Image (cartoon, rainbow, N blue to C red):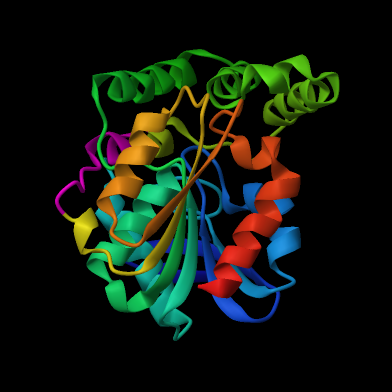
Amino acid sequence: MPTVKTNGINLYYEESGQGEPLLLIMGITAPGAVWEKHLEYWKRSFRCIVVDNRGVGQSDKPQGPYSTAQMADDCAGLLAHLKLDKVKVVGVSMGSTIAQQLAIRHPQLVKAMVLMCPWARCDNTAKDIFKHMIDIKARLRPEEFSRYIQLLIFSKASFDDEENYQGMLEDRENAKNDTNPQPLIGLEGQAAACMDHYVLDELPNISQAVLVIGGEEDKFTPPWMTKEVATLIPNADLHSYPESGHAFHWENIDDFNPRVNNWLLEN
């Protein structure tokens, strides 16, 4: 299994597909394998590089707190190991904050970015959500924590759709049987990075083409966060999915996968 020593940790990654390099950065609590439904589509056009962020999956899980700048440096070390620059980047949720920092701190490494449900800063509501997530992780069984995350990221329409809801029930059962769950220490480190992320002053300096995407019913990172990021980045386009939550990319997968694929090919 490929790992690279970067920024003081062992970082796990996988590659698939051929074409221009595309770095995929996942959100809080989730390993890179969660990109699966998108990776199957995008790897037809790109050399996809999927990473387990520090604190989750098969990467090291050191004591936190972490920072989004630190996690961007982790990714920069991976790209250096692969001898890559000017890569395209897709980041979701926490992954979008890492992608922002990658473009800010290592602009020579980033050619274009897709930022999914991003934020430039956390207000008190967002900070309390991350704190509550830690409390729940510490107190509930894995399947109960999975249900909480689902309530946070999916829209009402997904819960009302019987096929989607059955998938949620299966995911809860999978969480109960997960042999490599994220430890509390990893979640605490990642949550600290999310809460402390603040790049209002730096985003106007990003010169790369950027596509910002959000869900209009996102309870986790509400539309004002997405719109703020899109407004601050000079070359950003904004697309919003109606009646969709934080997991808009799964809720609208038949539109989302080709939309992102085509935008990346054009930029």
Q: Vertically, is 13 above or below 56?
A: below
Q: Position of residue 198 (x, y in %)?
A: 20, 43
Reply yes or no: does residue 189 show up in magenta. Answer: yes
Count of labels shown? Answer: 0
Magenta segment main secondary structure: helix
Q: Looking at this view, name the residue that lies furthest to the right.
A: 163
- Residue 171, percent across and down? 73, 29
Most foreground residue, 250 or 266: 266
58 over 137 or under it: above or below: below
Q: Nearer the viewer, residue 180 or 100?
A: 100
Q: Decide if residue 196 is on the left or right side of residue 215.
A: left
Residue drawn at point x = 39 percent, y = 39 percent: 226
Asked which quadrant contains residue 194, the reply is: top left
Residue 163: in magenta span: no
Quarter of the N terminus within the rendering: bottom right
Q: Residue furthest left?
A: 201
Magenta stretch bounds: 188-201
Asked whether, in this view, residue 142 is left or right of residue 9, the answer is: right
Q: Position of residue 188 (x, y in %)?
A: 35, 33
Q: Position of residue 137 (x, y in %)?
A: 48, 21
Residue 116 seen in this snapshot = yes
Which residue appears at 48% of the width and 35% of the height? 183
Q: Quadrant of residue 64?
A: top left
Q: Is residue 138 above or below residue 69?
A: above
